[in-house]
């Protein structure tokens, strides 16, 4: 009998101990699950607004909901979406991409076929320039829900970046047929721009702006794209007005400040442009506007200041790339940016290396091919630049920078018949191309008509 009681007591003690272990494990797991990222403070001028207060309160409410219920997938995904929006507003992609990715992955561990989580992860991968992976996930989401406009928007973006322009057009048509709104109109505008239809692009981007809520960040972003279209087509007055309106509706919006800087640079007011770029840079994290600032310094003859910025960019982007090798959550390909940074410091070999790295990821993209063709031009290998140039021109883009570069490459390669119309068209734009490119293009153009 005593043995029986002893066994019963041992079993009870074992059961109790097991219970404590299970409870502790659940508590530990819960602590892991509710490990949340926080919003970071914005810069003083960009952070003091009703919109920022609403964003911060929304984030706090979502975090509390998740702490109360770690399995609240809806709140986890809403917080991820908020982080993605904040990344564009602040430029702190490294931090917010990591934050959004963690919370999306938490949902996918619990529900691997969650449509919203897969779609958001595709967006994050596109933000990190992992375009092929992002497009693959977007396709997976589309198969789950083929009647969702949002996922077709992601597919438009992914296909554009991969150079699948015909597929991007099909996705955009499907998107606007499901939901004609600010997101679908803006993508149609971008595709029209790619295909050289600037009047059509301006029309579509106007529709996007008018479909958005005044002061909303997405509306402001589309308004900035409209301003850029006016810049490219030579209507600086309209572009400047667009940027001023944006700042009235959304004070401290860095992209609008940078737009005014471009306007100033286009009329050779470099001191004003530098001051505005510095202001825009102070509103953001990272190097969003430093490339344009460095270019403006070069145009102003302040090459030493330009070199300092370029070397800082190269050092930082290289470190981030090395970090990404061991932590996929912060992986961000920056080879295209590094290509132009190395070009500005005249390190042609490294510029070629990074251009080829990007080309190997997306060999059909017109911007990547333009960069590689231009790098070979700078090296003096004009013949080698031609195949990449042909790909860059495949959509009949009317971007004056591309047209001038193409004319210069063909001229140096001895194809005068191809060079003349490209330079003629490119030089019609009195603005948007930087002074050094315009000067070189004019010199070569004049040599073709002695």
Image: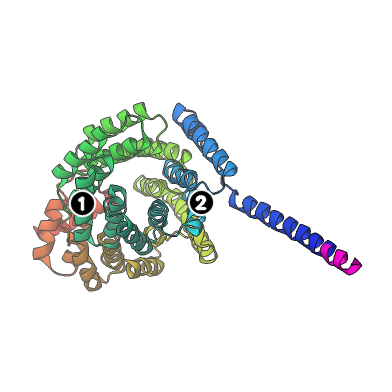
Q: Which circle's residue, 1 or 2, is located before the other in the chain?
A: 2
- Whole-number angstrom distance, CA of label 1 to CA of label 2: 29 Å
The residue lying toward the viewer, choosing from 101 and 232, is 101
Q: Residues within 10 Å of mark 1 (few under 14, many from 20)?
A: some
Q: Is residue 40 visible?
A: no
Q: Is residue 418 above or below residue 237?
A: below
Residue 141, percent from left and from top: 34, 57
Mark number displayed over residue 174: 1
* Contact flag, marks 1 and 2 (Cβ < 8 Å): no
Report which quarter residue 422 is drawn in: bottom left
Residue 7, magenta (yes or no): yes
Q: In front here: 163 or 376?
A: 163
Magenta stretch: residue 384 in it? no
The part of the chain drawn in magenta is 1-8
Residue occupying image coordinates x 37% and y 39%:
255
Which residue sits at x=51%, y=46%?
72
Q: Residue at the front extreme?
A: 1
Secondary structure mostly seen in the magenta stretch: helix
> Which numbered dot is residue 364?
none
* Quadrant placement of the N terminus: bottom right
**Callout 1: helix, strand or loop?**
helix
Q: Taking 190 as reference, is 72 left or right? A: right
* Residue 368: image location, x then y, percent: 30, 62
> Circle 2 is placed at which residue position?
103
In the image, 225: left or right of 62? left
């Amino acid at each position: 009998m005593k043995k029986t009681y002893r066994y019963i007591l041992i079993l009870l003690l074992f059961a109790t101990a097991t219970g404590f272990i299970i409870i502790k494990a659940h508590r530990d797991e819960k602590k892991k699950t509710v490990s949340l990222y926080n919003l970071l403070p914005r810069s003083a001028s960009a952070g003091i607004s009703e919109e920022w207060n609403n964003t911060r309160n929304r984030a706090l409410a979502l975090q509390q909901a998740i702490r109360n219920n770690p399995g609240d997938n809806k709140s986890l995904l809403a917080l991820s979406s908020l982080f993605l929006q904040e990344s564009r507003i602040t430029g702190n992609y490294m931090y917010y991409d990591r934050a959004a990715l963690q919370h999306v992955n938490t949902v996918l561990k619990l529900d691997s076929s969650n449509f919203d989580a897969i779609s958001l992860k595709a967006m994050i991968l596109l933000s990190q320039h992992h375009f092929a992976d992002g497009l693959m996930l977007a396709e997976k989401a589309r198969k789950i829900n083929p009647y969702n406009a949002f996922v077709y928007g992601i597919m438009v973006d992914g296909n554009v970046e991969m150079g699948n322009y015909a597929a991007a057009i099909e996705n955009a048509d499907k998107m606007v047929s499901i939901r004609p709104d600010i997101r679908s109109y803006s993508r149609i505008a971008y595709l029209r721009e790619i295909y050289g239809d600037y009047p059509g692009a301006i029309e579509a981007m106007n529709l996007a702006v008018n479909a958005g809520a005044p002061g909303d960040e997405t509306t402001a972003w589309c308004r900035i794209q409209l301003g850029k279209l006016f810049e490219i087509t030579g209507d600086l007055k309209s572009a400047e007005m667009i940027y001023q309106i944006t700042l009235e509706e959304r004070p401290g919006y860095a992209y609008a400040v940078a737009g005014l800087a471009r306007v100033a640079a286009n009329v050779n007011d470099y001191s004003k442009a530098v001051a505005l770029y510095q202001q825009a840079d102070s509103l953001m994290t990272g190097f969003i506007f430093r490339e344009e600032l460095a270019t403006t310094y070069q145009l102003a003859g302040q090459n030493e200041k330009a070199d300092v910025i370029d070397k800082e960019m190269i050092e930082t982007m290289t470190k981030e790339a090395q970090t990404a090798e061991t932590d996929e959550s912060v992986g961000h390909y920056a080879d295209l940016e590094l290509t132009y940074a190395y070009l500005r410091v005249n390190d042609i070999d490294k510029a070629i290396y990074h251009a080829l790295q990007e080309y190997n990821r997306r060999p059909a993209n017109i911007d990547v091919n333009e960069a590689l063709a231009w790098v070979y031009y700078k090296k003096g290998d004009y013949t080698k630049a031609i195949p990449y140039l042909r790909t860059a021109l495949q959509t009949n883009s009317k971007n004056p920078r591309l047209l001038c570069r193409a004319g210069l490459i063909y001229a140096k390669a001895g194809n005068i018949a191809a060079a003349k119309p490209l330079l003629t068209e490119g030089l019609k734009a009195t603005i948007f191309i930087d002074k050094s490119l315009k000067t070189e293009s004019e010199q070569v153009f004049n040599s073709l008509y002695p």
